[in-house]
Amino acid sequence: MIAKLRILLLLSIPLLSAAWITLSSANVDFESENLDKVYAKYTKSKLESTHDSNLLRRLSLHLRGTIPDGKESLDFAKSNETEKLRLTSIQYLKSPEFAEYWATKLGSLFREQTNRRNEVYGGFYNYLASSLHDNKPYDQMVREMLTADGDLEKNPAGHFFARDSADPLQVAEYVGRVFYAKRVGCARCHDDKFDKSFTQRDYYAIAAFFSQQFYRTNWWDEKRFEGENIPNIPNEDIENLPLKQQKIVKDRNREWDQTFWNKKSKEERQKFTEKHKLKYGKLFYEANLGIRFPIKDDKPGGDLVQPKFPDGTIPEIKPGEDRRKVFVDWLVAKENPRFRKVIINRIWKELMGWAFFTPEDDWNSGTVVYAEDVLNHLDQVFLEKNHSIKELVYYIVNSQAYARRTPANEDEKSNHIQFFPSRRMDPDQLMNSIVKGTLEVDQPKWLFSERRLSNFFPKKIDLKGKGALRVPDKDQKDIKFASQMERPPRPNQFLAIFGSGNRTDVDDDHSEITIDQVLTLMNGRLTGKAAWDFGGKDSQSVKNFEASKSMSSVVNDPFIILLGREMKEKERALLLSNLPKGDGHFERQILQDWVWAIMNSQEFLHVN
Amino acid sequence: MSIKSSFNRKEFLQASAALLAGFTIPRTDLSAFSFSDLFSRSTDAADDLSLPSPIKTVIFINMEGGMSHVDTLDPKKNSAFGRVSSSIRNLSVLEPFQKTAKHLHKLSVIRSTYSEDGDHGMAQHLLNTGYRQTETVGIPDLPHMGAMISYVKSLNQKPSSYFPRYVTMGGRNGKIGDPGYLKVEHAGFHVGDPNKPLSNITPSWGKYDTDRILRRESFLDTLNTEYNQENHSLNLDLWDKMHVAAREFRDSDKISSFDWSKEIFFDWSNQLLIIRFYAGGVGFEPTTTSLGGLRPIRTRLQ
């Protein structure tokens, strides 16, 4: 009886599971369908999807910055699981690779540099990657950066300000471009001669939001005037205090010099500065500070400028209130969709190959916005998803629009809305894919690291990341992933050759195709070593040959790993014609040459 | 730099205007417009673009940030310096350039450059392509400075295998080497490390004889031929052409001209650059220029 019950129970498990899947699927709101409905307004005909293994490869490159694992593409293509794309995208979004890869995108946007004096090594990158990994809402991330105070080690969000030494005029320019797509730099020196609505005073009015702070390195005595109602600020900032306060502060500083500093010996001064030494840069807030408008170059000393938002509205600020918080409240407010649309546009371009508007940091009265209904729709979704970048990415990649096929003929190649435009892998994708793809072959545990898809689709999606992040290491040894490389890379490094920028300007990576790049792939060290080391003693290739006694089977592996597909008949025929001793004889050089050819092929080099 | 040719600025502008006549960007389908189509239809106008001058070399130093024109070669009322007369009547420059002023008849100073964009990135785009960035949104194939000069200098030359007509150096932040719609033959070669200009002409890892290199390239050609039948993206076309050009460059008998070890002397500490560059058996006189710690981009014509 018990045995019968057990059998009944076992039989019922698949049935119950199927019922659960059906029910849970029914409960899941297929939101991405709404995106497709809006997207359809801009397409000429129904979108056709790319084949499954290519879709997985596209997804992996976009979300993790590398090709899929081993036979994952084949398994994905064979799977009948209806939720396989959604499940895989969740898996990818939770992986450390997502945070590592997208942190380099944000790093490029925010001009992050790994190794800067008085900053934590890799500190800004770590902050960005960790924030993404934790699925921190984008508005919260921006709020943390724009209201940062204190030591950079304790508050790594402060690296955003440290990048410009918290200079309010510099900060105003980059905040305008990065978060609001408004290029205000021209008005830094004079009224905008073409956009009459934006004056030099308007520029200073934005800077005024960021004028209550200063940045110190080396040393700073924070308790210099403790217990007194005297702003403790650097001498050079005194002119940015209200006039009445300037004299008081100057007098108190002079007194401090005379009664304290000047009486100390050289050794005592050294001891004092050592006591107040700052390990890293530190941001300080001082409510009384402002920014003074330069009436003329030769007559400085204008009035302290009142803050005004980039859209021209004037905020109500209470005395002593942190203006940066007032600015962020306005910036990330629900009523300010422009903030959201600016980042949506960047994410969309990465994933879809075209942008709603360009340049991405300049949205002015003459800007043409393409497919605006789609942008508006995504704005609503982003808002509903609590500014989660992961949720937005998830929403986009699960649409049919994302899965659209590449152009199959000359007539289709210019229509990017209808057909997915192939793009050369970016430097990070390329480096990661070459290293990963060629390591796998010689490391069996990687080669067959199939990831089985769960049959249970979760009702509530939790995209918080799992796993340790790989970040730049100061030794710069044993690097296997692009995320471990210092930015900006040196000019002769692989990443620089393929477009990783100097990080001196907003998003200064380039995507040009150059002769230098072709030669680097043909003969460079990275691809050269990867191909040359293939098929060595104890490698997976040798083991495969010992088991199969077939070169066709051996050469088929790099196709699967690097391209996510099996060899085609024509390719197999070419292989066999180059095997003088036949398919049953191991030819390492032939294997190496195929690996080289695959790594240089159009199919491998592009996100298709 | 002096340009003596029958092709003056006014004619250049007229020719450019003719090229652009009737040009509209298809806004509705967001297509990436290609200038190459336009160019192929405008061969008459393109033929007017010629530079039959004795100029052999153009050195273009792109200074991203530097001295203000207001205080150097373009006197303005608000300059901090006084004016000095130059060797050209009625033309003055500012005091810091008083020595240069004596040789101004040997130079051309363009003072009519005008931009409505007060922005470094946009200014780079305008300077290196001739187009305002905001007006060329959606046009990914604008040629850069070196490619344009290469084009007008080679109009009457017969098509040949690829060999770079110019090299670029320095950071790649600017728009400095992309041939755009002018095709790959006008692509420049970028030198990342001036002390080692060619590092990937031969395999850097392992030993390969010619037969083996040809064999692996036959594998590659098969892979690409198969794939190009199913995917016709614009970028694939470009990569394909660039790959052919790279092979031609690698196999060129002129490649020894890139052996700079005996031809170029770099002394970065003194910020002095001396170039003696031979290409195709044609020698060039030494040129000396101060780099001044700025980003140099040199454009050299064959």
Image (cartoon, coloured by chain):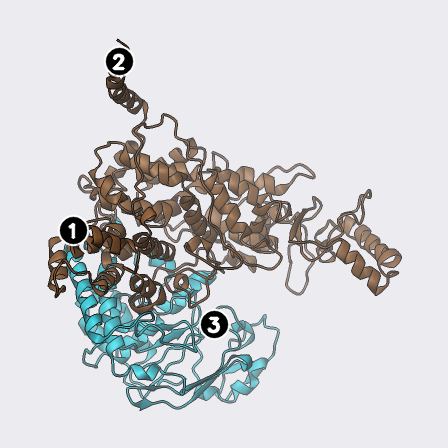
Location of residue B169 by image quarter: bottom left
Please indicate, yes or no, whether residue A407 appears anywhere in the rendered image.
no
- Binning the other alpha carbons within 10 Å of mark 3 as few (below 14), some (14 to 19) or many (20 upward) gives some
Q: Quadrant of the C terminus of chain B?
A: bottom left
Amino acid type indicated by mark 2: Ala
x, y (%) of residue B13?
31, 72
Are the residues flagged by discs 1 and 2 from a single subunit?
yes
Up-down: is B62 above or below A560? Answer: below
Q: Pointer 3: what residue?
A: B295
The amino acid type found where label 1 is placed reads Ala
Q: Which mark is residue A408?
A: 1
Picture residue at 69% right of the left edge, 38% below the top: A319
Tell me the cyan chain. B
Hue of chain A? Answer: brown
Regarding mark 1 in the picture, which secondary structure is present there?
loop
Work out whether residue A235 can be spotted: yes
- Give the number of the mark in front: 2 or 3: 2
Task: Pick whichever of labels 1 and 2 is earlier in the sequence.
Answer: 2
- The subunit carrying tag 2 is A
Disc 3 + disc 1, Cβ < 8 Å: no
Q: CA distance from mark 2 to mark 3?
A: 82 Å
